[in-house]
Structures are given as C-alpha cells and as structure tokens.
Image (cartoon, rainbow, N blue to C red):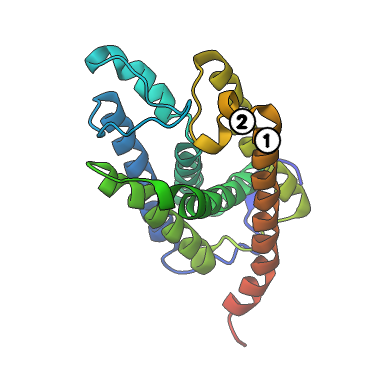
Amino acid sequence: MNDEVRPAEGAGLRAGSRTAYGFNALLAWGGFLLVLALSATGSFAAAPRKGNVYGVHPDGVAGAWSRVCDTASYFTEWSNVVVALSLTLLWLAPGRDTFWRRVLRLDALLMITITAIVYAVLLAPTEVVTGWSVLTNPWQHIAVPAVTVLVWLIWGPRRWITGRVVLGSMLIPLAWIGWMLARGAVVGGYPYAFVDVATYGYGPVLRTVGGILVFGVVVALVYWALDPLLSRLSRPKP
C-alpha cells in the first residue's frame, strides 16, 4: 500500500468514534505535558538514585533543561506521545488512511501496552511513589493504556493491521533504544535500572531490550489476530 489518502476501507468506524479518539488524545497529551511541566519546574519529589539511572541535576532553573531531556527520554513518555499523535490524527480525520497512519496506530497500541506491562512487572514492585507521582504514574501507566486499548477494541479503526504494518511498527521502539543508549553513553545515565549499561554492560542490557522488543512483536501479532475478529463482531447484522 502506498501513502495516498483514500477512504478507510473496512475501518469499521462506529458512532462516537471521533469523541473517543479526541478524549484518548487529550488524556495522553495532558499526562505528557503535565509531567514535562513538573519536571521542568523540579516539582517531583527526589527519589533515591539506584545505579546510573536518571536523577542527577543542578538545583532550580539551572537543572530545568537536563530534567526535561531526561523526562523526554523515558519509554513511557515516548509511548504516551505516540498515543497522543495517533489519536489526534484520528480525531482530525477519522476516515483518512495511509500506511504511516496505520503504523502509528499500531505503535500506539503496542508501545502503551508494553509501558503498562513493564511498569507493572519490573518497576512498580520496587518503586516508592510520592508527591506528584501519585497522580502522574497511574495516569500514564494505567489510565492511558486502559483507555487506549478500550478505544481500539470498540472504535478501531478495523482492518488496519498487516504484516508490513507490524514490521513498520518496530521503527519507533528501535529508535528509542538507539536514542536511550547513545544518550546514556554521553550523559552516563539511563532511564531504568534494567538498561543501566554502566552497571550491567551492553550484552545483558541488549538481551533485555531485545527480549522486550520480541515481546512487542508478540503484542503486535495479538492485536493483528484480534483485528479481523473484532471486525466481524462489529459488522451490522443483515
């Protein structure tokens, strides 16, 4: 399929879809912008630093830029921004269908799903949540993932996932891995303890992120398998 704009054939758009897309986009944008503003102003409670993870900044205004750059380098923020962009495009033009819109839609689903699962399994059990994080953590790791998946389950668009779209959806996660490792080599800090190259070395870290990437492919394949089933269920009965 090329990138020409054409009607969203088989999209399965239902009543209320545009409202749902808009609410989903606002929820994702709101969480991201709030976290960015709180980071810039140094409003988050300082957490004990474990290993070489993010968290060392000058006090006050002097540390605003480094705090914002750290925040923008978390996979959580990338996934929430991808959700926000994808759902904004759907809200603006729900009938518009191109290959890259399809890729972005699947990326929103698989990235926010990975965010929720990795947070629940690897991060939440040992994380002490205080201050503004009591609001922002469940917002970005629970509320946005739940709403994003629910909106897709009910409002689609349907029949957008293909093998080529699944392959394309790996580009943004790979870009995040490259950015996170390259930036970490420069600043000596990493977003999560399990990708702390300075502590564990590149081999173990690459195996870990490789495993998560494979899990992302599995998640994408699950959504692909569900797509035609949901399309049949949402088809009007004769």
Amino acid on which disc 2 is placed: Tyr
Residue 130 in which image quadrant: top left
Residue 191: x and y in percent read: 48, 32
Residue 210: x and y in percent read: 70, 41
142 w.r.t. 60: above or below: below
Residue 180 at least partly seen: no
Question: Relative to 144, is 169 on the left or the right?
Answer: right
Residue of label 2: 200
Q: Residue furthest bottom?
A: 238
Pick whichever, 192 or 63, lies toward us.
Answer: 192
Question: Relative to 126, is 212 on the left or the right?
Answer: right
Pick whichever, 195 or 69, lies toward us.
Answer: 195
Total numbered circles = 2
Proximity of marks 1 and 2: CB atoms separated by less than 8 Å: yes
**Who's the residue at 76% across and 47% down the image?**
1
Residue of label 1: 204
Question: Which type of secondary structure does the marked residue at label 1 adopt?
Answer: helix
